[in-house]
Amino acid sequence: MPENIKALRRRVRSIKNTGKITRAMEMVSAAKLRRTQAVMNSARPFSRKLSELLGRLAQSEFAKANPLFEVRPDGGRLLVIVTADRGLCGAFNATIIKNARRELLANPDYKVFAVGRKGRDFVAKYFKDRLIGEVTDFGGSVDPEKADRLGERILNYFLSREYREITILSMEYLSTVSSRPRIARFLPVEASSFGVTEANAATSVDYILEPSPERVFDAVLPRYLKATIYVALAETFTSEHSARMLAMNNATKNCKELVTVLTLRMNKIRQAAITKEIIEIVSGAEAAG
C-alpha cells in the first residue's frame, strides 16, 4: 500500500508539472495568435484592393500577353505545401499532410516545394524524389522579407519555364476554433481569379492609370502574387497558433481532471490503509483482553 501511494504521489506531481508546461504553452500560443492575426487582418485588405484593380485590367488584351497568364502545354507541375515547423497543434499538420498525400498520389507529375519542417519531413520520407526545394525558417511568424524572397523564388520557377503550373496548399483561417485546408492554382493567373468577369466588369471602377495600363499591370501583378503568398503564410500560421492554443488548453484540462482522479484514488488507498491498521489494533486489543 505505501508503495502504491508513493507511486501515485510521483505521478500526480509529474502531471501537475506537465499541466504547468501546457498552460505556459497555451499562453505563448495565445500571444503569437494575436500577433499573426493582426498581420493577417492588415494584409487581407491590401490583397483585396490589388485584386480589384487587377480584375479590371485582366479583361484587356494586353493582360493575355503577360507571361504570368501564359498557359503552356509542356513543363512540370509544382505543389507548394505550407505547414508548421513544430507540432503539438492537434490535427493541424496532419490535415494538410493528408490533403498533400491525396494530391501527390492523384498527380504523379507533381514536384513539391515545402514551406515548414513538418511538410518537408513528410515529403522527404514518402516522396523524396519529388522534393525540389524547402524553406523551414519562418518559425510560425510571417517575416515580410522572407515572404518576399519566397514569392520571388516561386515566380522564377514559372517565369523560367521550369514549371507550367504552380499550386499552393495551405490552411485557410476561418475563426479561432475553425480552419480548413485550401488548395488553389497560383500560376498561371486566370482573369476569373480576381473575381471580375465580363458580366460585372462594366460596373467596376474605371481607373486612370499612368504611365499606361500595361506598365501598371506588369508592375502590380507580381506584387499581387507575392501578397497572395504572404496572406497564405499569415493564414496558415494564424491557424497553427490557434490550433496549438486549443490543443494546449485541452491538455491542461485533461491534466487537472487526471490529477483529481489520481488524488481521489490515492486518498482511498490511504484511507483503506488507515482503516486496516485501526482494525488490527482493535483486534489485537480484544485478543489481549
Image: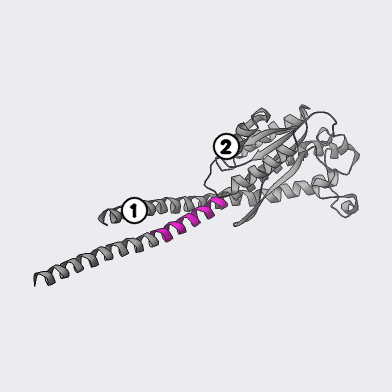
Q: Is residue 206 in view from this perspective?
A: yes
Numbered circles on residues, count: 2
The label nearer to you, 1 versus 2, is 1
Q: Is residue 81 magenta?
A: no
- Which label sits on residue 13? 1
Q: Position of residue 181 (x, y in %)?
A: 67, 48
Residue at 69% from the left image edge and 37% from the top image edge = 80
Q: Position of residue 22 (x, y in %)?
A: 45, 52
Mark closer to the chain start, 1 or 2? 1
- Which image quadrant for residue 165? top right
Overall secondary structure of the magenta section: helix
Q: Are marks 1 and 2 in contact (CB under 8 Å)?
A: no
Label 1 SS? helix
**Residues in magenta?**
243-259
Where does label 2 land, which residue?
117
Disc 1 residue type (three-letter): Arg
Q: Quadrant of the N terminus?
A: bottom left
Q: Is residue 258 magenta?
A: yes
**Position of 191 relative to 130 (above/below):** below
